[in-house]
Amino acid sequence: MNNLLEQQVPILRPGTSLIQLVNGDYYVGSPRKGFCFTEIQRYRFLQSCDGKKTLSEIAQLIGCESNSLIAFLESAISNNYLLLLSDQITSGEKTRRDCESNFYISHLDSHNFATASAVLFRQRAQHEILIFGSNQFSVALFAILQAAGFSKSRIIGSFGFDATQIIAEDLAGGVIQSSDIGSTLNQISKRISREHQLVNTAG
């Protein structure tokens, strides 16, 4: 391997499975499209493509010859189930799959985890999730979404239930409390929003 190739860091595309079949062969790909092969070295190579090791490190780890490793790499890239981190960084055209890969890769670096989390919460605050229902599960789900940063999520009750008062049988632990008896679904939604939101959307 040349010096440039040795420093490449390969990683399986998100959503790609790597398994051994009952007959002893190996499979890589998605449930809809994939490829079978028989070489144990190719399998060990793909197992090592975790986005943390360079090709040089993988070659030493699995004891594979350079030519075989290059052949495995080229085949995987051409069949679209493996990518190189450097290609992801320098590519100018981004597809939906590239965006998903970038999101996945950004979480591999623990030094950027706090920053990535803050960006993730800001992105969640931009999405409006509508919950159609009026049972205890709907209210609990609403509270979870609020706490997860989806501050624009809303409950939409059915057949005018929004204005119906909560009765004692509707109590559900820490989400619907005894103090909520007599309140409407709209009133409870406002309380849950105040108590569970972790993101200041005004900022």
Image (spheres, grey):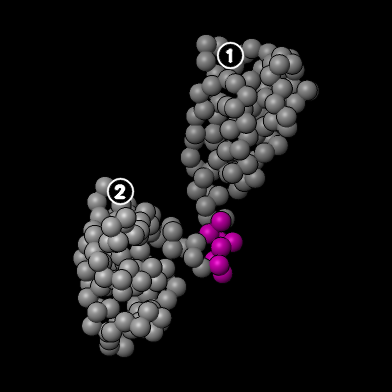
Dot 2 amino acid type = Pro
**The magenta segment:** 110-117
Q: Secondary structure at mark 1?
A: helix
**Residues packed near mark 1 inside 10 Å, few (<14), some (14 to 19) or many (20 plus):** some
Question: In terms of secondary structure, where does tag 2 sit?
Answer: loop
- The residue to which callout 2 is attached is 31
190 with respect to 14 (left or right): right
Q: Write the residue at 62% across / 31% down.
A: 140
Contact check, label 2 and label 1, Cβ < 8 Å: no
Amino acid type, label 1: Phe
Task: Say which residue appears at 49% left-offset and 65% top-offset.
Answer: 108
The reply to whether residue 155 is visible in this rendering is yes
> If you read the primary sequence from the N terminus, does the residue marked by circle 2 or circle 1 appear first?
2
Closer to us: 200 or 96: 96
Q: Which residue is mark 1?
A: 161
Q: Position of residue 185 (x, y in %)?
A: 63, 20
Give the foreground label among 2 and 1. 2
> In this view of the protein, can residue 90 be seen by the observer?
no
Q: For residue 178, which quarter of the picture?
A: top right
Q: Quadrant of residue 188?
A: top right
Q: Is residue 163 above or below residue 5?
A: above
**Residue 145 coordinates in the image, percent (x, y):** 57, 38
Residue 139: x percent and y percent?
A: 61, 27
Q: How many marks?
A: 2
